[in-house]
Amino acid sequence: MKKTAGNAPKRRGQFASICYRFSRNRMAMLGLAVFLAVVFFAATAPMFADYEADAVKQNVYAKFFSPGQEGHILGTDMYGRDLFARIIFGARLSLLISLSTVGASLVLGCLIGSLCAYYGGWLDTVTMRIVDIFLALPMTLMAVTVVAALGTSTTNLIISLTISMVPPFVRIVRSAVLQVKGSDYIEAAVAYGSRDMRIILTHVLPNAIGPIIVQATLNLASVLLSVAALGFIGLGVPSPQPEWGTMLAESKAQMRYYPWQVIIPGAAIAVTVLSINLIGDGLRDALDPKLKNG
Amino acid sequence: MLKYISRRVLILIPVLLGVSFLVFAILAMMPADVAAVQLGVSATPEGIEKWNEEHGLNDPFLKRYFDYMGGLLTGDPGVSWSSNTPIKTEFVQRIPSTMALTAGTIVLVILLGVPVGVISAIRQYSIFDNISRLLAMLLTSLPAFWLGLLLMLKFALELDVLPATGGGSFAHYILPWITLSTAMAAQMIRMTRSTMLEVIRADYVQTARAKGARPVRVVMVHELRNALLPIITVVGIILGQTLGGAIVTETIFALPGVGTYLLQGIFKYDMPVVMISVLFIAAVIGVINLLIDILYMYIDPRLRSQFVKG
């Protein structure tokens, strides 16, 4: 969650009170519990199933088992692959892609956004005009265009989603930093003669991080949805890798006779996204009690 | 007013030109063997060379961009790489479907989202509010393509009351409209509710109540009018998401719109097709946001007077 190294006593008090407010929010705690469960299955997936044998290898004798049949908790798909194994390895893949996308765009967004806001001038003007151009395209469309150019692969998916995520982050970081920039303690740090980089890293960013963290959490949910959506239209993670959206697209044709093939991967996406959204909402309320009406 | 509009248009034009350059540059990174893909198995090195020459791929990047934009601005988006037919006729036929999908979605979102959000805010913490908040949270997290498949499963395959795929009639759009508007309506409810909650506590609302204005009048005249600006902003955001999400919804229901055209173009490495589809969507979003900005001026006298002075 929040990293508040440096100015210890006062910040820790604030941090503790944020944790306290978060823990009092029942929906947010539910979201956190569900999300941790997803993370647990994603992290320990190899203990439950073997990636090659269960999630990827096709088995013509085990097609379309119903959930529970012959030891397959969630049944098998049209190639006889265990659905439970595919779902938990899918969780791994989805979380890996979305976390690295959000992580990369967070770092780039913080870097560009805080430099723009801190220095202002032509750097700010030029960057914001470029950001305007990027933001003129909806996120899905931007990602689709980049995938179209680079081709479909997991790495290209992360690259394309990062490219479409950075501009909104730059905007948010920039406005958060601008709000902090005028504060007395920043002026004090400048007067004290601290180097710019030190001021940005130890004074500006930690104080502006609240809205950025909330946005990052909510963006994690939308990236997760985008990964699945791109998989669904055939531009995401290529099969046979068990990505949830790709699984949905593959099962679409058999939907009439084997509806659970479509229901299960979709439910996995919905539950994960919901848990992240609940956490994001809880964080927003905890960070800013005044806003507690959303 | 006119001055404001013209200034706003002058901002939109460079942004759209920037988008066209950006998209062209991204698509120029397409793998170099496009010619081999388009010519198929019968491709010979000479054939590939000839194809590249014909489609201007041997020219420098900037020349290609200016050639393309020159054509586009005179109303000719070029020839499809995969089918060798002019893009214009096919593309124009695709527009009504996407427009119908988007317009219907926006109408549904406003009709569902605004009233529910308003009632939720007026009766804060009531049963209605709690249920609508919970539903809004659940529905924003639903992947649209999953919802679309489930709806199709129920209403097209099981009950057989609506067509599953294809376009043309009103009935074909009912499931796509519901699919696309659900998550957006949920967003609208949340936004309307939180804006209304801010407005309800404002001094002028207290004054209106104290003066003995009827509750309906307080809501409609004093509260909703002041909450209108943020609500219109959300409509703009939702429009962007709708057009961006059209590619997914059109794919689920096999609607003959711009989104499916774009996707076909991608799978066939058909650069001009991808280019025109992306630019079209960006241009529509840009123009609608321009209209929304102008609408602000009509709604909010504060913005108008500010501009008259400046």
Image (spheres, helix red, strand yellow):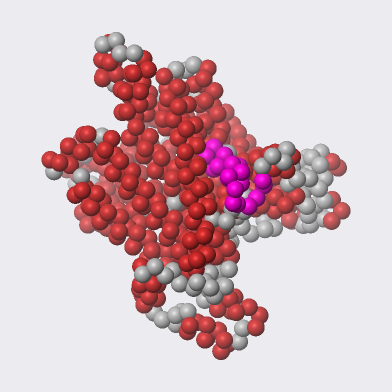
Q: In this view, does A202 lie to the left or right of B282?
A: left
- Give the residue at the far front of this rendering: B169
At 70% across and 53% down in the image, what residue appears? A250
Q: Where is residue A167 in the image (x, y as percent from the top left)?
A: 38, 52
Find the magenta span and give its range. Answer: B163-183
B284 and B37: which is toward the camera: B284
- Give the residue at the far bottom of this rendering: B46
Q: Position of residue B173 (x, y in %)?
A: 58, 45
User: Which image quarter holds the C terminus of chain A?
Assistant: top left
At 55% across and 69% down in the image, what residue appears? B269
- Give the residue at the far left of this rendering: B309
One can see residue B271 in this view: no
Can you say whether A221 is above or below B216 in the image?
Answer: below
Q: Is residue A155 magenta?
A: no
Magenta part mainly helix, strand or loop?
helix
One can see residue A250 in this view: yes
A47 and A159: which is toward the camera: A159
Q: Position of residue A75 (x, y in %)?
A: 79, 43
